[in-house]
Amino acid sequence: MKRQVIVQIQTENGVKEFDGIDVKFSVSRVMSSIMNEAQISICNLAKEDVEYLTTFTSEFIAVQQRKRIRLFAGYEETGVSLIFDGDIARAIPTSPPDVWLNCKALSGYYDNKETTSISLGGMVKLGDICSACSSSLGIPVVNESTQQKTISDFSFSGSKLRFIGELNDLGGISAWEDNGTIYVTDSNTPRGDVEARILSEDSGMIGIPKVDPVGIEATVLLDNSLQIGQPVVLNSSIFKQANGNYIIYELKHEGHLRGSTFQTVIKARRIK
């Protein structure tokens, strides 16, 4: 299938979209309160775009301005999907003749620079805390936890992303932000809004899975439909001892539109 990569960059003059120019990327998304990270390199942008993005994305050169970057990847036959949504933290160009703009981007980069305060009196349910988190961060929360616990006089003051960590500190749940949405599930429980995926040689798995202390690491052809928290079923004909049910806790998309790499590395935790 023919690869397709689209990059959107938000500037003060609106969103600029780049399709068809050479792009390299490495995207890491995780089930935790830390920021998702992407290294995105774009080849031969217009001179004015390189100058604009470079000049105003380093605090050592000039005052930073927020610039959002969104990366879509997939195949022309099946379409592209969003695999990263975040803020440019650094953008540095290479030397001619082929000028690559090397961007480091983080999800919630500017949100993490801001602080927020929340105070909820009385006996507070998890759903109320999730709603307060959603209002504070200004992004939706998908709460699938069955936890019925209540907390007395909940209060928090700190960075917005640290608030997601506060949810995790409550115990018994997993909370994380992914591409603009906060997800909350019971600990070691997959999301219920996505179907389980089969990992096998027939479904595009490359080589055999690696076993680690908590589960497996498997590589597949780039799959833009995989999600953090999604259940997967390993069905390897070579490494049958590792077969079973898992939940994805980390995804790494790696690709080069005109190079050899175009894959997704899955890290998944074993579940019953």
Image (cartoon, helix red, strand yellow):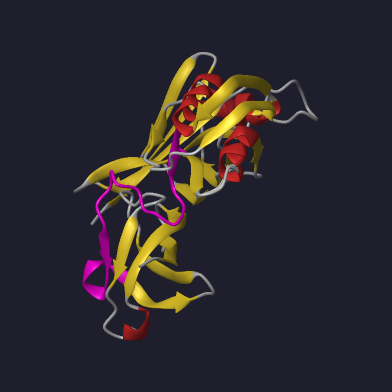
Above or below: residue 23 compared with residue 137 = below
Number of numbered labels in the structure image: 0
- The answer to whether any part of residue 121 appears in the image is yes
Give the image location of residue 157, x and y in percent. 70, 26
Residue visible at 40% across and 29% down? 17
In the drawing, does residue 228 fall left or right of residue 30? left
User: Residue 250 or 271: which is nearer the viewer?
Assistant: 271
Decide if residue 197 is on the left or right side of residue 43: left
Residue 243 locus on image (x, y percent): 32, 77
For this orientation, the residue located farthest to the right is 60
The residue range painted magenta reads 178-205
- Answer whether residue 73 is magenta in the image: no
Q: Closer to the camera, 92 or 157?
A: 157
Quadrant location of the N terminus in the rendered image: bottom left
Classify the position of the C terminus by image quarter: bottom left
Q: Please, is residue 263 above or below residue 162 in the view?
A: below
Residue found 31% across the figure and 70% down from its top: 205
Q: Position of residue 38 (x, y in %)?
A: 55, 45
Residue 49 in the image: above or below residue 99: above
Q: Residue sitting at 40 percent across and 51 percent down? A: 229
Residue 207 placement: quadrant: bottom left
